[in-house]
Each structure stands twice: as structure tokens, then as C-alpha cells.
Image (cartoon, rainbow, N blue to C red):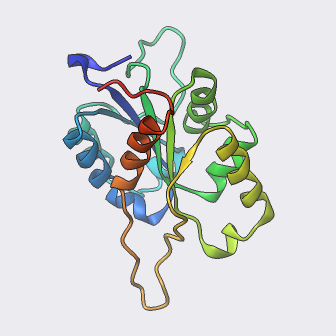
Amino acid sequence: MSGPGGKPFLYVVVCAAGIAVEVPKLITAARERDWEVGVIATPVALHGGFFDAAAVEAQTGRPIRSAWRSPSDPRPFPPPDAVVVAPATFNTVNKWAGGMADTLAVGTLCEAYGLGVPVAVLPCVAGALAAHPAYRASLERLRGMGVRFGDPYAGEAGEDGVREEFHWERALDLLEAGDREGGTPLTR
């Protein structure tokens, strides 16, 4: 499975967190590593102004997907070779782990497991939410499904208004490390 030009195709799932404004950094890093990229956003991330959709579409050369397509519509992206979820929110992680595919973004994540597509996740969850037992159980379930998680990250600005650096490239490193550790091969 690969995109036009024979490059591997990466789906980037973007959730509604403030750090999503920096998702072009992930797209740039992926393209530098020879991935073609298509973005799928949760409806709130896309329509809530969490990132510059026009800039991302210009950067990828593809429309951002957020809604289901009708059966007669062509598929706008080729099948994924891998998926990155960044930033991944409390809501998305819990719905995904529970198999509640009520949005295209979560449906895509649920389907990736059945297709054997490798998935890397960079969580962006406030500490109070990360302490919730449902979230911890969701992380455990997803890890058991082979999902690769970056280091936990609160993603919230501190009391001084400063936000820690979000290491976007870590998601790509996780995909490559999984390949070296016997995970699903990433043909590149």
C-alpha cells in the first residue's frame, strides 16, 4: 500500500487540543522522511479552529477528511501504511479503546487494528483527566492491541502560560522503532 509515486502513505489523525495548531511540524517531519500524508481531523478539531485547515491542505496537497464519504464518492486517500494520532485527546483515546466509531477519525482508528496497520500516538491530556481510571484502562487496552504511545504529555500550558515542547517527530520514531522491533513492516 502506498500513495502516488510509490511513497508510503501516512494518515495523521488530529484531535481538538490547543497544540494541534502545530500539526504542520508533524507533516513536515513526515514528508522529510519520505511519507505522503493525508489528514483526518475530528469534527471539533476541524471546525473549532484548532489548526489552520487551509494551510494543512496546501501543505499536503489533499483535502482534510472529517466526515464520512457517501458510497458513490471516490476514496480521497489510498489505504494507510501507518497512522499517527497527534495530538490524541482523552475523548478520542477512550472512544477508540471502547470501539465507539462515531466519527470518521475514531472509525479510522478502530479499523486500523483490523487491517494490521501500525499506529503511533502522542497523547495530549490534562493531568486531571489522565488520572481517570477509564483513561488508564483505555491506554492499557490500546497498548495490548499493539498501539505505540509516546511519552505521556499533558499538553496544557502551565500556570505561567508556557507550554512544554511537543515532540511531533516522536510519533514517526515510534513507527520506525516498531519496524525494527518486529512490528508490522513499513515498506519505504
Q: Is residue 133 or residue 150 the one in the foreground?
A: 150
The C terminus sits in image quarter: top left
Q: Is residue 110 above or below residue 174?
A: above
- Toward the top, the furthest residue is 72
The reply, left or right, for residue 40 in relation to residue 28 is right
Nearer to the camera, 47 or 176: 176
Q: Residue 140 location in percent, x, y?
A: 72, 51
The x, y position of residue 67, in whole percent, is 52, 32
Residue sitting at x 61%, y 32%: 107
Q: Residue at x 39, y 55 (%)?
A: 170
The answer to whether 36 appears left or right of 90 in the picture is left
71 w.r.t. 54: above or below: above
Q: What x and y, as percent, mark residue 141? A: 73, 45
Q: Nearer the viewer, residue 100 or 181?
A: 181
Looking at the rendered image, the quarter that the N terminus falls into is: top left
Side of 51 where 111 appears, left or right: right
* Residue drawn at 42 percent across, 16 percent down: 75
Q: How many marks?
A: 0
The residue furthest bottom is 160
Q: Nearer the viewer, residue 175 or 79?
A: 175
On the image, the x and y values in percent for residue 13 come to 47, 42
The image quarter containing residue 19 is: bottom left
